[in-house]
Amino acid sequence: MALIVQKYGGTSVGSVERIKNVARRVIKWADAGHQLVVVVSAMSGETNRLIGLAREIQPEPDPRELDVVASTGEQVTIGLLAMALKSLGRDARSYTGFQVGVHTDSAFTKARIESIDQQRIRADLQAGRVVVVAGFQGVDSDGQITTLGRGGSDTSGVALAAALDADECQIYTDVDGVYTTDPRVVPEASKLPSITFEEMLEMASLGSKVLQIRSVEFAGKYRVRLRVLSSLTPWDIPLAEEMRSGTLITFEEDQNMERAVVSGIAFARDEAKITVVGVPDRPGIAYQILSAVGQANIEVDMIVQNQSVDGFTDFSFTVGRNDYARTLGILKSQVQAHIGARDVLGDPKSCKVSIVGVGMRSHAGVASTMFRTLSEEGINIQMISTSEIKVSVLIDEKYLELAVRALHRAFDLDAPAAASA
Ligand code: ADP
Ligand code: ASP
Ligand code: MG
């Protein structure tokens, strides 16, 4: 008997019929003798709808109240799934994050899980019940409802698996695993039977939304066995087949597998570039620019400072597009005159494309293949950043699809046997 945490995303619980199918699938696992804790998201589109309602009242919604509103989508699905389970004869209980005791910090809309109480869940599992828990939400030490950031139900699932020391955490979604890139953008993308934790962390942090980055961080920290698989297959496929399906996130590289140099391509659409032009090149300038932005709680991603000419340089960095106008405003009003910069320019229509692979460590020339491929397509690179296992470039967003497809081809990821190319 194994203890399994399953998480079903928005599309997987997007209709009453799909919720009934989730119930049938869960019962299949429970009937095989496993203990099941099931985490669900809100029905697809529901969280967007709730946030939209909040914005109709307040264009910049009060974060505490926004969490009160946005967290309700999950409360609906836990109740419906528990009903579906009971109507099929399986005892079940639904719990909100508050009821279970998913304790978080107080950072509304992007709270971090600090601990999870086990008592209630363990008692229900002992009593033979399926436990259904609302994803995406928690409660802070003051009893306030918090949410974990968009896509946060993945993190609820993995954090529960870590807290309960579950045998496996299964993330059921609308694709049947982690692909070499988003299959919606590149139909030729191939499914990876496994991906290293390190690569998954890079893919998630570079924009691949199949798993929320914090869920991968949790899985790494607590060594949770994590699998991504499809909820859209017939619910009654044999259990043994389902157990082997999808993509397993592994902690070691599979020694038997000849690794591709590049395992996957990630992209982030909503980037914006800011350039502070004509900055005096002296100590403390980068600090003055970036601390003003940091104090406004704006996250900075890529940073480039040019060679100085006659004691002046240009300083560029990227922020999320949502923060673009605010960042520009802060720099123009608080920083430009103070540091004696000539101008502050911006381009809100950028995107970031990254190649990721542990194979890069042992292969030279990966970056140059990337740059050659982009130049052959006539795509200008605005910024570059690298680490041991990734190369990222910032480009004009109109070239995003073209760049991802061309790179996918250039690194031999198109073929079905891509993973062993
Ligand atoms: P859920 O609602 O189940 O949490 P998400 O929409 O958050 O689902 O994540 C699944 C989606 O992630 C897929 O439909 C796919 O378009 C997208 N995606 C992006 N990159 C990848 C990738 N490398 N492999 C698989 N899916 C990806
Ligand atoms: N419902 C939340 C969202 O749409 C959480 C999730 O689906 O993971 O972001
Ligand atoms: Mg998701």
Image (spheres, rainbow, N blue to C red):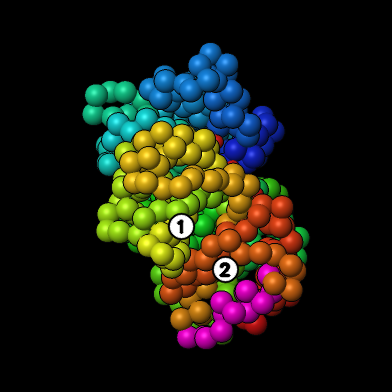
Q: Amino acid at mark 1?
A: Asp
Q: What separation in Å lies between label 1 and label 2 (alpha carbons)?
A: 27 Å
Q: Is residue 75 visible?
A: no
Q: Position of residue 386 (x, y in %)?
A: 47, 69
Q: Which residue is mark 1?
A: 314
Secondary element at image label 1:
strand
**In the picture, residue 182 is in which quadrant?**
bottom right
Q: Give the magenta range.
A: 362-374
Q: Which residue is painted at 52% across and 86% down in the image?
A: 364
Q: Which residue is mark 2?
A: 355
Q: How would you classify the magenta stretch by its main secondary structure?
A: helix
Residue 194 sits above or below residue 277 on the image: below
- Quadrant of the image for the C terminus? bottom right
- Quadrant of the image for the N terminus? bottom left
Q: Which residue is painted at 36% across and 25% down in the image?
A: 145
Front-lying residue, 363 or 349: 349
Secondary element at image label 2:
strand
Q: Is residue 62 left or right of residue 391?
A: left
Marker count (numbered): 2
